[in-house]
Structure formats: structure tokens, C-alpha cells
Amino acid sequence: IFRIFREWRAYYEWGEGPATDGMGDEALNAIGAVRREIEDRMFSLPCQNTMDVLAKLVAYTLNGEEFGDDGGAWSGRILQEAKLAVDEALSATAHRPSRT
């Protein structure tokens, strides 16, 4: 996931940068379609660790700019993965009461 995220980040930054200034709608739509293809590849993979979850959240929110409503298509899965990562971290660090 993180390898695909690096690809996404580079493409996102290029698409949002000065290189695309003055491009017409057709070109910008094509750039958006490629970005969404990269997102689909990344979002379809199961998270292996917390960094995967964070990478997906950053990409889903367009680099932290917005949280879109996709009817749960990807957001539901990503948020569920985030919850599972937090639950795993909590259980790994849970303080067990001592027996005294």
C-alpha cells in the first residue's frame, strides 16, 4: 500500500501543481481519472499495518484537504480498517490489573 501511496502522492502533487495550470477540462479530467485508478488499486488492498491505514486516509481525503462522501464505497472500508488498527494498538498496550 505504501508503495502505491508514494505513486499517488507524486501524481497528486504534480496534478495540483503549476504543471497543470491552464490545462483544459478534458486534460484535467484525464488526470483525475488516472489518480482515481491509483486510488482504487490502493484502496482495494487490505491494510497490513497502521501506516497503510494512514496512507489510505491521506489519499482518501485528497492529502488532508477534504473528506468526501462516497456513500461508504471506500470510506466505510478505510474507516473500518482505522478502527481495527486502533483496537489492535489498544489491546497491545492494555494495562492488565495486577493480582494483589
Image (cartoon, rainbow, N blue to C red):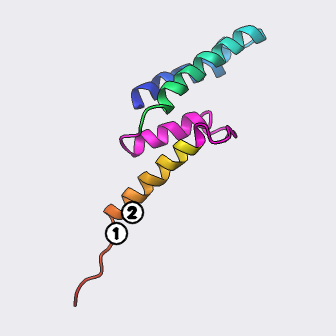
**Which x, y percent locates residue 72?**
63, 42
Which residue is nearer to you in this view: 63 or 89? 89
Against 87, residue 62 (above or below) is: above
- Most distant residue in the left direction: 100
Q: How many other residues sit within 10 Å of disc 2, few (<14), some (14-19) or many (≥20)? A: few
Q: Which residue corresponds to the image point at 41% horizontal and 37% vertical from the top-left?
A: 46
Q: Confirm or deny contact between disc 2 and disc 1 (CB under 8 A).
A: yes
* Magenta residue span: 47-75
Residue underneath mark 1: 94
Q: Which residue corresponds to the image point at 65% horizontal and 12% vertical from the top-left?
A: 19
Residue type at tag 2: Leu
Res. 66 in view: no
What SS does tag 1 mark?
A: loop
**Which x, y percent locates residue 20?**
68, 13
Q: Quadrant of residue 24?
A: top right
Q: Is residue 70 magenta?
A: yes
